């Protein structure tokens, strides 16, 4: 079928990568909104968690969909990385990059794998835990200095990953115009910085 052939192509893979990345970014926004309740009180966060898990069917559907999207994003990213390395070869002495953040673009596969490692641990510890006592679990976890360091490191890596991923997504979707390129370049730093500050502020709140 045509759509299978399309997603086998380089352009199709990039669209799949951008589409799944956009979905994951929207999930990150909703996750950030829920976690932001911790700035008010643990009780409000617990109320948010209780309300969320009072609809198990909806949670199950969205969790399954998110898992599929995440797997597609990972597989496509690995395939594109291997494809780009094969096409580039090893004879180039000078690497030209159009990305505003060459460090992030050259380490996408590694930052992505670290994020996967963090997500697996986060899912095991938090998502599969006792949701009726999730606020106490969060409070207990963030009483550990090592947990806080690991958590903050994960979101620093995520910010680096996003600084190229967000730009690449916009380029794939055709959001590219001389009039707006300055703003787009700024957003590649503003968006990751927003999530970094919000999520890292949470464990620091518990620490201090």
Image (cartoon, rainbow, N blue to C red):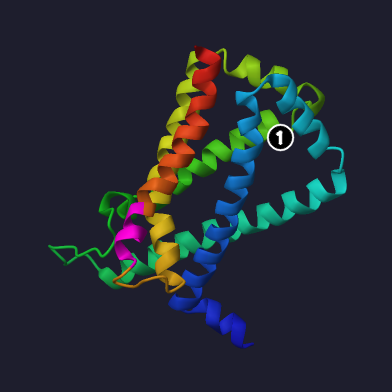
Residue 198 on image: x %, y %: 50, 33
* Residue name at image x 34 percent, y 59 percent: 183
Query: In front: 157, or 188?
Result: 188
Residue placed furthest toward the bottom = 2
Q: Which residues are magenta?
A: 180-186
Q: Answer with left or right where residue 150 lies relative to residue 130.
A: left
Q: Residue at x 60, y 81 (%)?
A: 4
Callout 1 secondary element: helix
* Viewport quadrant of the N terminus: bottom right
Tell me which residue sits at (59%, 39%) in the image: 32
Q: Which residue is mark 1?
A: 127
Q: How many marks?
A: 1
Up the image or down, 57 lies above or below 137; here it is: below
Q: In the current view of this chain or complex, which residue is farthest to the left?
A: 93
Q: Quadrant of residue 7?
A: bottom right
> Is residue 147 visible to us here?
no
Q: Position of residue 15 (x, y in %)?
A: 50, 71
Q: Could you say where residue 135 lies in the image, as x and y percent from the top left?
A: 71, 21
> Which of these two is toward me, 173 or 97?
173
How many other residues sit within 10 Å of disc 1, few (<14), some (14-19) or many (≥20)? few
Query: Which x, y percent locates residue 132?
Result: 82, 25
Magenta region includes residue 183: yes
Give 71 or 18, whichever is nearer the viewer. 18
Pick the residue in front: 153 or 195: 195
Figure check: 18 above or below 156:
below
Image quadrant assignment for residue 136: top right
Which residue of the protein is positioned furthest toward the front in this rendering?
A: 179
44 magenta-colored: no
- Name the residue rendered at 47%, 79% in the picture: 9
Q: Main secondary structure of the magenta part?
A: helix
Q: Is residue 85 left or right of residue 78?
A: left
**Does residue 131 appear anywhere in the picture?**
yes
């Amino acid at each position: 079928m045509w759509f299978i052939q399309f997603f086998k192509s380089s352009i199709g893979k990039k669209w799949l990568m951008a589409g799944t990345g956009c979905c994951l970014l929207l999930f990150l926004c909703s996750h950030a909104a829920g976690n932001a309740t911790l700035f008010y009180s643990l009780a409000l966060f617990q109320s948010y968690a209780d309300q969320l898990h009072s609809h198990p069917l909806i949670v199950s559907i969205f969790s399954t969909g998110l898992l599929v999207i995440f797997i597609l994003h990972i597989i496509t990213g690995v395939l594109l990385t291997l494809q780009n390395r094969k096409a580039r070869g090893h004879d180039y002495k000078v690497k030209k990059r159009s990305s505003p953040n060459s460090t992030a673009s050259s380490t996408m596969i590694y930052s992505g794998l670290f994020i996967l490692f963090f997500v697996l641990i986060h899912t095991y510890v938090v998502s599969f835990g006792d949701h009726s006592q999730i606020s106490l679990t969060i409070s207990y976890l963030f009483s550990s200095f090592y947990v806080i360091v690991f958590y903050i490191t994960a979101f620093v890596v995520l910010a680096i990953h996003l600084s190229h991923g967000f730009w690449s997504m916009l380029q794939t979707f055709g959001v590219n115009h001389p009039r707006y390129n300055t703003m787009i370049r700024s957003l590649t730093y503003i968006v990751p910085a927003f999530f970094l500050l919000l999520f890292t502020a949470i464990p620091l709140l518990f620490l201090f």
